[in-house]
Image (cartoon, rainbow, N blue to C red):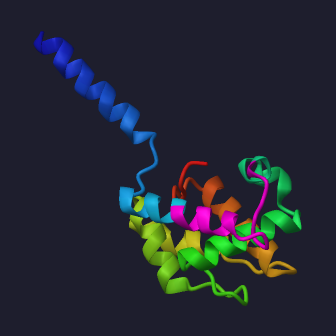
Amino acid sequence: MKTVFVFLCVLVAVLARGLPNLPENERIKLAEVHRSCQSNPKTFCDENKLKNLFNNINDPQVGTHMLCMAVKAGLMRPNGDFDIPYLKQKVGLVVRDHSKVDGLIQKCTHKAENSGKTANLMWKCLVENDVQYYHQL
């Protein structure tokens, strides 16, 4: 019985390591931000496009929604500028090795030809680098 208990504890720890480590209050906040952006006809986006962000990087509808998400989450300003200190704080919540935060911020904060695409590329970069600052669609 003791062996089974130890095995289950190890299994839970291994499985939990692969789960997003975003605190629940942050996940709820991002879900609320998403609902808010979806409730506005100007920032609404088809959920299937959002689930396939990598295939829709150049889609203006996706960009408008992702900019809305970034602005309401506090990561970007409406003009497309990044709020670097706030972005560092949020990335620091989910990156285990805090020495990597500055590098990730530098890597994921490049301006594109418009604010929507800039937001798309930031979110894409965060996902590609396993920065789990997102809610589940």
Vertical relation: 85 (above or below) 35 = below
Residue 83 in percent (x, y) is at 57, 86
Q: Position of residue 31 (x, y in %)?
A: 53, 59
Q: Quadrant of the N terminus?
A: top left
Name the one closer to the observer, 1 or 67: 67
Q: Nearer the viewer, residue 114 or 10?
A: 114
Figure quadrant of residue 3: top left
In this view, 112 is above or below 23: below
Q: For residue 121, what is the image quadrant?
A: bottom right
Quarter where residue 9 is shown: top left
Queried whether the magenta region covers residue 84, the answer comes back as no
Residue at 31% x, 30% y: name it. Answer: 12
Magenta stretch encompasses residue 45: yes
**Count the marks: how many?**
0
Q: Is residue 13 left or right of residue 4?
A: right
Identity of the residue drawn at 88% across and 63% down:
59
Left or right of residue 12: residue 98: right
Q: Is residue 12 above or below residue 86?
A: above
Q: In the displayed structure, does residue 120 sit left or right of residue 5?
A: right
Residues rendered magenta in the picture: 32-47
Q: In the image as oriented, which residue stretches furthest toward the left? A: 2
In the orientation shown, which residue stands out farthest toward the top?
A: 1
The spot of residue 77 in percent (x, y) is: 64, 87
Q: Residue 104, how many percent across, how many down? A: 57, 68
Task: Relative to 97, say whether 10 is above or below.
Answer: above
